Amino acid sequence: MQVSLKKYTLVLKHTFSISRESYDFQDTLIVGLTQNGKTGYGEATSNRYYKITAESMIKEIEGVMNEIEAFDFSTPDDFHQFLTQKGLSNFSICALDLAAHDLYGKILNKPLYEIWGTNLDHYPTTNYTIGIADIDTMIAKMKEKPWPIYKIKLGTDNDVHIIKELRKHTDAIFRIDANCAWTAKETIENSPQLKDLGVEFLEQPLKADDWEGMEKVMHHCVLPIIADESCIIESDVEKCGLHFNGINIKLTKCGGLTPALRMIASAKSLGLKVMVGCMTESSVGISAIAQLLPQLDYVDMDGALLLKEDIANGIQINDDGSLVFPELGGSGITLK
């Protein structure tokens, strides 16, 4: 098996802001795994919050490159188990795991969703994310991209007012992501007004380790609460079952599709709703998420829609939110 590593700097259409940071560019690592004349691609973005850079991932992977290339690849599960023993970050493991799945499906000439025993009869529509900005800018972004579901990033001093103003311009479903910026009191007090304004759920309103606060929220909030920063790896799912109504799985954080599949099964066994979210990534990462769609209640896979220029072909997201799945096996990814 041959390994290729390449850093890209993705340019965003607009400055993207959440409660803790803003950015115009996103560094990302694309991994290629080649075997039997087929190449699978995977991706993991840099992340300031988790102190991950494209350079740190490249250094990690290059440190075990010889072992990876000597590995007798047969299935993604075996490969993932091998990777977890090499001291790699979950972000590096994710990029390699996504590439392994894409490669595996291309070798079998089947899409991953079919390999996993699912079909495309029913799947959720992705939301489109509106980052924190002044209200006029947020409205302009909605008008630029009419969409059936918006995820609205909040974490300001006038969050309810923002939603009241945005609601005047669309009938779309709203989902709110405060990225840990609220207190339990704010969450409970804001929720009735937000529910009346057509908000479907709240994502990670409190700090990731505020389990006491989340217990209060679970008892008194009138909207469902979805965990994000509180649910990073497989072992977090069970604890979230007592404090949230659902979980948002990020492939980069958990280490790829292999653990994500187990997290989905675990969450469903606990009666939790399941969402998979994205970073601001290219169609390499987004196409991997798309293969999970039949297993999900909600999805946030708009990362490539936020870019000025994509670097890959794969899942196609149309202007009405409908999808065109690639004909290639695996995640169906080709680089441009």
Image (cartoon, helix red, strand yellow):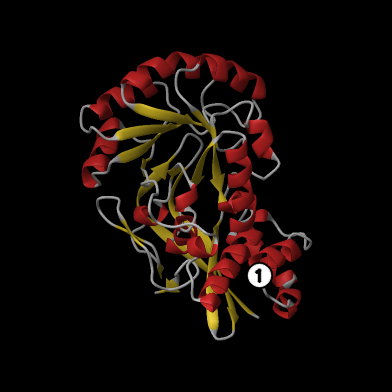
Q: Position of residue 104 (x, y in %)?
A: 57, 72
Q: Is 119 on the left-hand or right-hand side of 134? A: right
In the picture as drawn, the residue positioned furthest to the bottom comes out as: 37
Q: Residue at horizontal 27%, vertical 38%? A: 137
Q: Residue at horizontal 23%, vertical 44%? A: 146
Above or below, comparing residue 228 to residue 64 in the picture = above
Q: Is 107 on the left-hand or right-hand side of 162? A: right
Can the viewer see residue 279?
Answer: no
Q: Is disc 1 surrounded by few (<14), some (14 to 19) or many (20+) residues within 10 Å?
A: few
Q: Position of residue 199 (x, y in %)?
A: 36, 27
Query: Which residue is denoted by mark 1 in the rendering?
Result: 75
Q: Dividing the picture into quarters, in which one does residue 127 lie? A: top left
Q: Residue at horizontal 47%, vertical 67%? A: 111
Camera-nearest residue between 249 and 14: 249
Above or below, comparing residue 189 to residue 87 in the picture = above
Q: Position of residue 211 (x, y in %)?
A: 65, 24
Q: Amino acid at mark 1?
A: Thr
User: In which quadrant will I find the N terminus?
Assistant: bottom right
Q: Is 82 on the left-hand or right-hand side of 297? A: right
Camera-nearest residue between 216 and 177: 216
Q: Dividing the picture into quarters, in which one does residue 56 lie? A: bottom right
Can the viewer see residue 52?
Answer: yes
Q: Position of residue 33 (x, y in %)?
A: 59, 75
**Disc 1 on helix, strand or loop?**
loop
